[in-house]
Amino acid sequence: MRLERLRIQDLRCLHEVELALAPGLNVFVGANGAGKTSVLEAVFLLSHARSFRSGAREALLARGAARLSVFAELRQGGDRLLRLGLGRAASRWEARLEGEGASLGELIAECAVTCFEPGSHALIAGAAEERRRFLDWGVFHVEHAFLDNWRRYQRALKQRNSLLRAGTEPGSPLYAPWETELAALADWIDNQRRSYLARLRPLLHTCVAALLPELGAPELRYRRGWAEERELREQLEAQRGRDLARGHTSLGAHRADWSLAFEHAPQREHLSRGQEKLAALGCLLAQARLYAEQHGDWPIICLDDLASELDEAHQAAVIAQLAGSGAQVLVTGTELPAPLRGLPHRLFHVEQGRLTRLL
């Protein structure tokens, strides 16, 4: 898939931006703080309905503006052109498809974007929540029912946590219906996650090993969030007293995690920050390749501040992979990255929130 046109209004410093993108490489250059990353952020919003940057959602809105919006024309599979948009006023997101109101789930099902940016090392070294997001995004694009079931799971989890925080006695019958619901949904979610990881694992092995050959073979390890030997419903019932003391549910699909271990670096603490970034990039490339295999169409690839995140040899290796894939790639930097100089690309200069096409 690829974006043919993109219009951004009042997103950070981008007050009124409209551009036509090339189907292959698109490069955005300019000084730090000019607004380059915000262009990628706008594209990412269409796929995730959240930013890859940390911080309050309110920071997305340009100073003095009442509303932000992102509109795009998305070409899927070479023949289908879809108009989609996302807006935010106050604290509410609004999605549109072909000019009609749509749910966020319907929007993100249509647009797939993966992004490598300065915070991507958190996929390896950060909290489990980042890894669950990565995993569940991939699962969602295989099984769209995942989003509804995950929301149902979250509602049941909230109800059980409310009972715990209210000090409800462990023997109360009020727990049982929510624990039954949690257990059934957790099993379904776990099965979907395992199935996805089974397909991702060989691609991840190839992509990560290519970037970090010195670490030996990578191994993906998965923990579902509760012990394997007993049903979750039984474990939740047995855990009520301890969860009551904690004030939250300590077992379930919301506690799942995965990790990478290497032959010569069995613990993630053995990795340098640079190796963490390369491992994360390998995971993102593997996920993009799997998406392409499953859909016959690559997701849009965003590479933020590429030259400062990777040395020139790794930049060249990544660009070579992507340039031959047919994927649409959006790259930012203070100047044109060296590996791109011999490749066809569309070049934009960004200055104080304004974009000018140079090539």
Image (tube, helix red, strand yellow):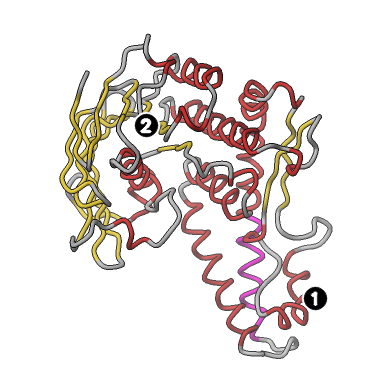
Q: Nearer the viewer, mark 1 or mark 2?
A: 2
- 245 versus 148 height, above or below: below
The disc label shown at residue 238, or none: 1
Q: Position of residue 9 (x, y in %)?
A: 19, 49
Q: Quadrant of the N terminus?
A: top left
Instruction: Say what secondary structure mark 1 lies in.
Output: helix
23 displayed left or right of 121: left
Task: Specify whether 38 is left or right of 202.
Answer: left
Q: How many marks?
A: 2
Q: Is 322 on the left-hand or right-hand side of 103?
A: right
Q: Amino acid at mark 2?
A: Thr
- Judging by the rendered image, the residue that carries numbered circle 2 is 332
Mark 1 neighbour density, 10 Å: few (under 14) some (14–19) many (20 or more): few
- The numbered dot on residue 122 is none
Q: Position of residue 64 (x, y in %)?
A: 18, 62
Going 40% across and 51% down the picture, which residue do you hit?
Answer: 51
**Could you say which is closer to the camera, residue 251 or residue 79?**
251
Whole-Å distance between the Cαs marked 1 and 2? 52 Å
> In the current view of this chain or complex, which residue is farthest to the front?
31
The one of 63 and 182 positioned closer to us in this rendering = 63
Q: Is residue 316 magenta?
A: no
Question: How many residues crowd around disc 2 within 10 Å: few (fewer than 14), some, or many (20 or more)?
Answer: many
Q: Secondary structure at mark 2?
A: strand
- Image point (77%, 63%), residue name: 231
Residue 221 lies, in percent from the top left, at 74, 42
**Corner quadrant of residue 46:** top left
Residue drawn 62% across the image and 61% down it: 254
Name the quadrant containing residue 275: top right
Amino acid type shown at disc 1: Ala
Q: Which residues are magenta?
A: 174-188
Choose the circle earlier in sequence order: 1 or 2: 1
